[in-house]
Amino acid sequence: MPDPMLRLQVESFLYEYAALLDEERFAEWPNLFAEGPCRYEVLSRENVDLGLPVPIMSCYSHGMVRDRVSMLVQGTLTYRKMRLLRQVSNVRAHAAADGSVIARAGITVFQSDEEGVSSLYIVGRYDASLASANGSFRITGMSVVVDSFGIDTMLAVPI
Amino acid sequence: MPSADHSSTPWPAADFSRVPFDVFTSADRYAREQSRIFRGPVWNYLCLEIEIPNVGDFVRTWVGDLSVLVSRADDGSIHAFENSCAHRGAQLTSKLRGNTRRHTCAYHLWTYSLTGELLGVPMEKGVNGKGGMPPHFDKRNHGLNCLRVTTFGGLVFGTLSNDTPPIEDYLGPHAVEQIQRLLVQRQPRVLGYLRQRIPGNWKLYNENVRDPYHGSLLHLFQVSFRLQQPTMRGGIKMDADLKNTWNHSILTEEDAGNRKTLSDAYAGTGKFAPEMRMADPSLTQVPLDLGDGYKTTILSIFPTLVVAQVDNTYAIRHLRPKGPNLVELHITYLGFESDTPEMTQDKLLTSNFIGPAGYISLEDGEALRLVQEGIRTRRPGQHEMLEMGGVGEIRDTDYLSQEISIRGFWSFYHRIMGAAP
């Protein structure tokens, strides 16, 4: 049974998630994850369809989530600096029996370079498990399954 | 517009310490590479035997610009042919992998065997006595364009030339030994694929994997977290043609002491951050499967294959050129049949080291892009310089700050391309 209120709450959470990353507030990104066990993965659609487990990017603990952005925060990573715009769409959400919230959404990421030239970077979907926390959510698990698994140049920042 | 190629121009340095920039940008040269290299006397990596274990299994891959199907036939033998119908040239399949009894063209249903022979032509004899193929038409003359196939250590190779030497001679002793070490002593299994489209010429990637000089300078993660550093032991070994390189590094206890002098090596770039700590260092604590102490071993086989061990990751990297300015890096990430579930989980953890998001590899995509972008506007007669580690003779080294193996690549490239640059 779809719950429009729940969907709105999840939508609002995912919009904040996308905005935080678009604004390159990388140091705050780990705050969106549950303090206890949590997981973040970017998966290739090719591997998912073949049942193969290797991720493109993965964090299996809150510490790994923090480590993934630490060089971005310090500015020591050499990568292609592009302005990214993450557009979240087709949001669906339902409450699971254990009280967590299962969220699914489409994600489109555009990239724009220093001279203002834009292109499509990533098309995929979010597949997330959320825990309610203080009127909002924390991510306990998130898979970003990308259809555009032929990654343009590199994947330096989380999606 | 004048061509960037000048076939009468000699290579700018006899020891290949200079490389004309236009070898990375010229469309004419790219077209010539298709015939001289990819359809020439080289062994092109096609796939792993374990990807087509059963009769009828096939995968689709690339040999330069050629789309190629690799197919397992009834007798277990492996065959490779162009993915293009002998009739009107249509692509036979756009599937990446599958299992089939026949390869059938969708357009007029011409049907081929698993070995690439033409089996069936609908309405070959016409309909009601009218039409059909002319009397001299013989299906035996219209099979698919086949490659000669060989295998070594579970790797499948193909060539379109009759002059390609036997595979072991082509690989050379160091490659034979490393393939045994990485792919034969344990039975590999595919844990997944990673793909990265790098906006740079395919030869820039060949330079990159023959360039241990950049390892500790571009990839700061591994230095900050003590996985690699410029003072560590290692070296390079090449085959007799100088086309294939094995480079390796060994991290020892004494390297910990050497870290004190490291700041100097970074020449005040501000990039070295020894104070960084990981919140969860489990990734860097996975033990090496093999007890031989090698931290990184990169085996680069001309023209497009790399068999790489980076820390405790094991992968096949295949270069798929997409014109002079773009290359797809296709990675087959491996575990082993003997791995315990914990070891497999560790390999998913350490996969964070490699690939398009890899802590020790993602910068390569950017480095290649920067070079391709930087040389786009360089003029004919201008060239890159390769002098690190010494000039003159191209030889093996027992040190890592070198570009000698890149010169080895260019000397063979020059030879196989026939004409001067």
Image (cartoon, coloured by chain):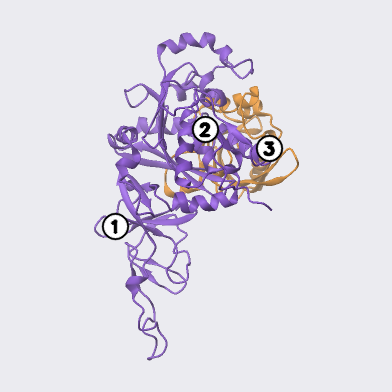
In the image, which disc is placed on residue B358?
2
Chain that is coloured orange in the picture: A
Q: Quadrant of residue B130?
A: bottom left
Q: Is residue B84 above or below residue B335?
A: below
Specify whether disc 3 shares its chain with disc 2.
no
In the image, which disc is placed on residue A82?
3
In the image, which disc is placed on residue A107?
none
Label 2: element kind: loop
Q: Amino acid at mark 3?
A: Met
Q: Quadrant of residue A114?
A: top right
Residue B109 appearing in the image: yes
Chain that is coloured purple in the picture: B
As drawn, is B119 to the left or to the right of A23?
left
Label 3: element kind: loop
Q: How far apart are the two marked residues, 1 and 3, measured between alpha carbons?
A: 47 Å
Lower sequence index among marks 2 and 1: 1
Residue drawn at (58%, 12%) of the image = B264
Which one is nearer the viewer's eye here, B190 or A106? B190
**Which chain does the residue under circle 2 lie in?**
B
Which one is nearer the viewer's eye here, B236 or A48? B236
Q: Amino acid at mark 1?
A: Val
Q: Quadrant of the C terminus of chain B?
A: top right
| Residue receiving disc 1 | B55
Q: Is mark 3 in CB contact (under 8 Å) with mark 2?
A: no
Residue drawn at (69%, 33%) of the image = A20
Q: Is residue B68 above or below residue B418?
A: below
Q: Amino acid at mark 2?
A: Gly
Q: Is residue B332 above or below residue A133?
A: below
Q: Position of residue B246 (x, y in %)?
A: 40, 31
**Which chain does the residue under circle 3 lie in?**
A
